[in-house]
Each structure stands twice: as structure tokens, then as C-alpha cells.
Image (cartoon, rainbow, N blue to C red):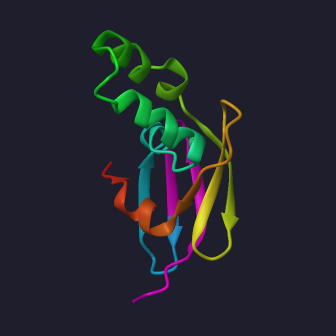
Amino acid sequence: MKNLQPTGFDLEPGVLIIQWTDGNRTAHDMGILRKQCPCATCRAERDKIESPKGLSSLRVIQSSTPTVARAQILQVLPVGRYALTFHWNDGHQTGIYAYDFLLKTTISR
Ligand SMILES: [Zn+2]
């Protein structure tokens, strides 16, 4: 298996571009990345939202949180040789995004 590493980043409004060691460039929707934040806090939030016990009206309100819709990455920091962490415009920065995960969330432009 290839050991892909990012070699550079482009922070566009709402879109993160990653340049990889194999020469590929991948685009990632920041709104999707923010919503899928893998940290424990966000995972617990999502579990609450997806809980079948929750009221449907409550779910709708929570899933359209404005801060999520306007998510913007301010800074990208490497975590070891396997992941990245992002500083978001809402102050959040505890999510660790493994390269494997990022490569599964690419968008075409
Ligand atoms: Zn999080």
C-alpha cells in the first residue's frame, strides 16, 4: 500500500484542496468535513441527532445549524504522518482527520 502524504494545501472559500505525494489533487467540501468531524464531542452530538428517540422537529433544526453551513478552515496542521487537524472558523480544532478518511470525502469540481 502506498504511503500517501499531503505536500500542500489550498484553502478556498468552503473548499479544501490537498496536494498529495502521488501528484493527485483532491477537493473537499468544508461543510461536509465539519459535519463529519471525528472528535468525541461531535460524534456524541451526531448520535443525539440521529437518535430515534429524538423529536423529528428538533432533528431538523439541529441539522441545519448555520455555523456548520458556513464552515471554513483557517489553518491546517499535520498530526503525525497519518492525519490532519483543522482550525475552524467556529473555534473548533479537536477533530483528527486521517488521510484514509479524507480520501473518502473528496468532491469533484
Ligand atoms: Zn469535533
Rendering coords of residue 3 (x, y %): 49, 85
Image quarter (top left, top right, bottom left or bottom right) of the N terminus = bottom left
Q: Is residue 74 above or below residue 69?
A: below
Q: Residue at x 51, y 50 (%)?
A: 38
Rendering coords of residue 40 (x, y %): 57, 47
Q: Secondary structure of the magenta portion, mostly?
A: strand
Q: Is residue 10 magenta?
A: yes
Q: Is residue 88 left or right of residue 16?
A: right
Q: Is residue 20 above or below residue 68?
A: below
Q: Residue furthest top?
A: 57
Q: Residue furthest front?
A: 53
Q: Quadrant of ligand 1?
A: top right
Look at the image and tell me whether residue 34 can be seen.
Answer: no
Q: Quadrant of residue 49?
A: top left
Q: Is residue 81 magenta?
A: no
Q: Residue at x 30, y 52 (%)?
A: 108
Q: How many marks?
A: 0
Residues 6 and 97: in front is 97
Q: Quadrant of residue 105?
A: bottom left
Q: Quadrant of residue 24?
A: bottom left
Q: Residue at x 33, y 48 (%)?
A: 109
Look at the image and tell me whether residue 105 can be seen.
Answer: yes
Q: Is residue 104 left or right of residue 16?
A: left
Magenta part of the chain: 1-18
Q: Is residue 53 above or below residue 61?
A: below
Rendering coords of residue 71 (x, y %): 54, 32
Q: Residue at x 71, y 34 (%)?
A: 91
